[in-house]
Amino acid sequence: MKTVRQATDNCCHQMTGRLGEASATRAASDTAVGEVVSQHCQLGAVMKKKDEIFFLVSLLKVFDLDYMSDEDATTLRSLDVNNSEDVIRAVQVFLMPEWPTYPKTARDRLLNVLRKSVSDPTENFVELFDQVGLAFEDELTDRRAFMASMLTVIEGETVQDERGGNAISGQKRQSPDV
């Protein structure tokens, strides 16, 4: 299995070779060279997209059945994954106590990726949620609404941190009032 770095290096090597071939034959038009560069940029966008999904998966792992106790799974099963208020409660209980432990640079990057993804009308989050086994009882029907609810909580916490307070950090997980 190739690493992202190996795949990127291979792609760059292929692009360089194609551009070299195009220049060597002098028969290639600007359009042909543009197509090679465009293909490379599209692959770069795919690679970047995969990196972004990896970051977002790290946020969703707190809701993954494979990474939680039976008690936490029971708590999540009692919440409606398709109800924004319940999702907000879940984020507050399961993600936010861990949020302050992430390095600031990681929090900033995660927040930026989350904002960008939620605001992108073409993002359907299928690839993201395919990598996580949510512990909620019901099947998630609106992935964008779930991510938007998560963003709302994280942004609220970030604003609170910037003002010098952090009401959630350091708290133990507590069952949400259901």
Image (tube, helix red, strand yellow):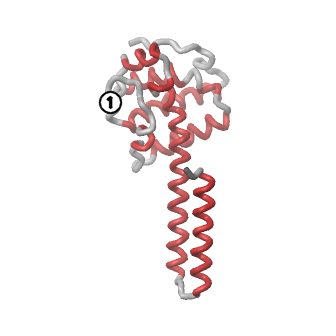
Q: Look at the picture and state if 120 lies above or below 88.
A: below
Expressed as whole percent of the image width and height from the top left, the position of residue 27 reads 54, 88
Horizontal relation, residue 56 to residue 107: left or right? left
Q: Residues within 10 Å of mark 1 (few under 14, many from 20)?
A: few
Expressed as whole percent of the image width and height from the top left, the position of residue 153 reads 50, 28
Give SS at disc 1. loop
At horizontal 42% and vertical 42% (from top left) the residue drawn is: 125
Q: How many circles with numbers are drawn on the protein?
A: 1
At horizontal 41% and vertical 20% (from top left) the residue drawn is: 76
Can residue 97 be seen here? The reply is yes
Q: Which amino acid is tagged 1? A: Glu
Horizontal relation, residue 107 to residue 73: left or right? right
Q: Mark 1 = which residue?
A: 139
Horizontal relation, residue 117 to residue 77: left or right? right
Q: Nearer the viewer, residue 116 or 20?
A: 20
Answer with the quarter of the image where residue 9 lies: bottom right
Expressed as whole percent of the image width and height from the top left, the position of residue 78 reads 36, 16
Q: Nearer the viewer, residue 16 or 115?
A: 16
At horizontal 46% and vertical 12% (from top left) the residue drawn is: 175
Q: Look at the picture and state if 2 lies above or below 89.
A: below
Horizontal relation, residue 9 to residue 54: left or right? right
Expressed as whole percent of the image width and height from the top left, the position of residue 106 reads 63, 36
Q: Nearer the viewer, residue 2 or 53?
A: 2
Can residue 63 be seen here? The reply is no
Q: Nearer the viewer, residue 47 or 11?
A: 11
Answer with the quarter of the image where residue 176 lies: top left
Looking at the rendered image, the quarter that the C terminus falls into is top left
